[in-house]
Image: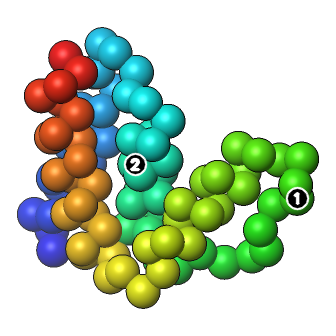
Amino acid sequence: MADLKAQFEKAQADVKTLTKRPGNEDMLTLYALFKQGSQGDVSGSRPGMLDMVGRAKFDAWTKLKGTGKDAALQKYIDKVAELLKTHK
């Protein structure tokens, strides 16, 4: 677990070094994996209709409901590695 946490922290730092901003779908995936890996399943109510960004984030996180924290952390790490190859 400590190794996975260290890799996750490195991935968080690495994603900030991207020279090109990932697309919206990739950004939502990163957001959802980060939240699932750090907080677990989504909680609270879905944001209102006028908060389109908030709704998109909530929906992306909701799709990961039931995914274990370790699995989400690993998927986040893998996604950042993929983005580093294509967005550097």
Q: Is residue 54 above or below residue 65?
A: above
* Mark sitting on residue 61: none
- Percent position of residue 71, x then y: 24, 74
Could you tell whether 43 is left or right of 62 in the image? right
Alpha-carbon neighbours of circle 2 within 10 Å: few (<14), some, or many (≥20)?
A: many
Instruction: Give the residue displayed 34% in from the left and 15% down from the top.
Output: 20
Disc number lying in front (1 or 2)? 1
- Percent position of residue 40, x then y: 47, 77
- Percent position of residue 47, x then y: 81, 60
Compute the Cα span from label 1 to label 2: 22 Å
In which quarter of the view is residue 62 placed?
A: bottom right
In this view of the protein, can residue 8 be seen by the observer? no
SS state under label 1 = loop
Could you tell whether 12 is left or right of 56 in the image? left
Q: Amino acid at mark 2?
A: Leu
Could you tell whether 77 is left or right of 36 in the image? left
Residue bearing the label numbered 2: 30
> Nearest the camera: 7 or 54?
54
